[in-house]
Image (cartoon, rainbow, N blue to C red):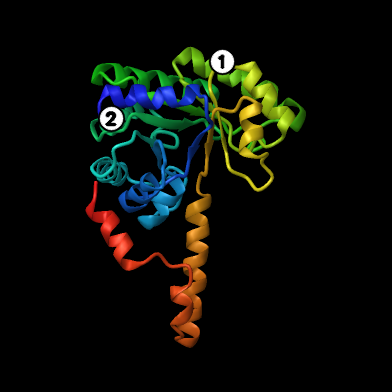
Amino acid sequence: MTDATAKTFRALHQGPDLLLLPNVWDAGSAKLFESLGARAIATTSAGLAWALGHPDGNALPMDALIATAQAITAVIRVPLTVDAEGGYSDDPATVGENVARLLSAGVVGINLEDGGGPPELLAAKIERAKQAGARAGVDVFVNARTDVFLRGLVPAERRVEETLARAARYQQAGADGLFVPGATDADDLQALTRGTPLPVNIMARPDLPSAPELQRLGVRRLSAGSAIAQALWGRAGALASAFLRDGHSAALFEEAASYPSLNSLMTRR
């Protein structure tokens, strides 16, 4: 991955179409989603952590994240953006070092989140991430995630105001995008997109407006988040439970991808 790839990824946030990201958790899922037409690949921190036997929530060892990023960039041609949660440290300097390692692995975009922490801390992390990109010669796209909606950090009537205040702070620190998981109401989404020059990213939810409506409201990026991984874990659990209970084989092959098609996919780059 080069700075040209980073510029390609940045351009995808400028339209005209909504950027749809079906988040992946390993190199195989990345290859599959790329083959289905994904214009960029994004990881899900939860799906990736679960695949490696860790919980979500800044518990993933940094070496494991780097190894997965390297495995993904080795087999795809489109840009890769990584959900780096809180940067895996409360020390902005360490976050900058972690981002530098991700860039060395071929990553061109990252998510950094405030979680329940102070906005000042995320702003400092963003500054370090951008500095790491400048040193590496990569115009890294930093998607600043705020959990104001997702965690209910302020009363409902203040969520938009607080989110936009944080967006301004994060933009000043160098953020390139604003990620607002948990926002689903059309009026809220329109207020968010009108209230910041940053391209707004939201996360899939059952009650979310349709993709064309999101585009009309000014949303630029829609992420599946952990939803696809959760659906597959649920399906895998149901299949394994039934197999362990009765040993029947037929259900294992319902809606299954064929062995030849998957094997062929994994032999191509």
Q: Which mark is residue 103?
A: 2
- Residue in view at x 40 percent, y 51 percent: 49
Residue 124 x %, y %: 43, 20
Classed neighbour count for the residue bearing mark 1: other residues with Cα under 10 Å, few (<14), some (14–19), many (≥20)? some
The residue at which mark 1 appears reads as 197
Q: Is residue 189 above or below residue 264?
A: above
Residue 15 drawn at (x, y percent): 50, 24
| Quarter-of-image position of residue 184 | top right
User: How far across and how far down the image is residue 186, in percent?
Assistant: 72, 32
Q: Quadrant of the N terminus?
A: top left
Examine the rendered structure and indicate whether residue 10 appears above or below residue 81.
Answer: above
Q: Which label lies toward us, 2 or 1? A: 1
* Left or right, 19 with reference to 163: left
Q: Secondary structure at mark 1?
A: loop
Task: State the residue at coordinates (25%, 26%).
Answer: 2
| Direction from residue 137 to residue 86 in the image, left or right | right
Q: Residue at x 63, y 34 (%)?
A: 212
In the rendered image, the residue lying farthest to the right is 157
Mark 2 → mark 1, Cα distance in angstroms = 25 Å
Q: Please, what secondary structure does the residue beneath circle 2 have?
A: helix
The quadrant where residue 92 appears: top left
Q: Earlier in the sequence, mark 2 or mark 1?
A: 2
Residue at image x 69%, y 30%? 154
The crowd level at tag 2 (other Cα within 10 Å; few <14, some 14-19, many 20+) is many
Answer whether residue 204 is visible to the viewer in this image: yes
Residue type, mark 1 in image: Pro
The amino acid at mark 2 is Leu
Q: Residue 81, which numbered label?
A: none
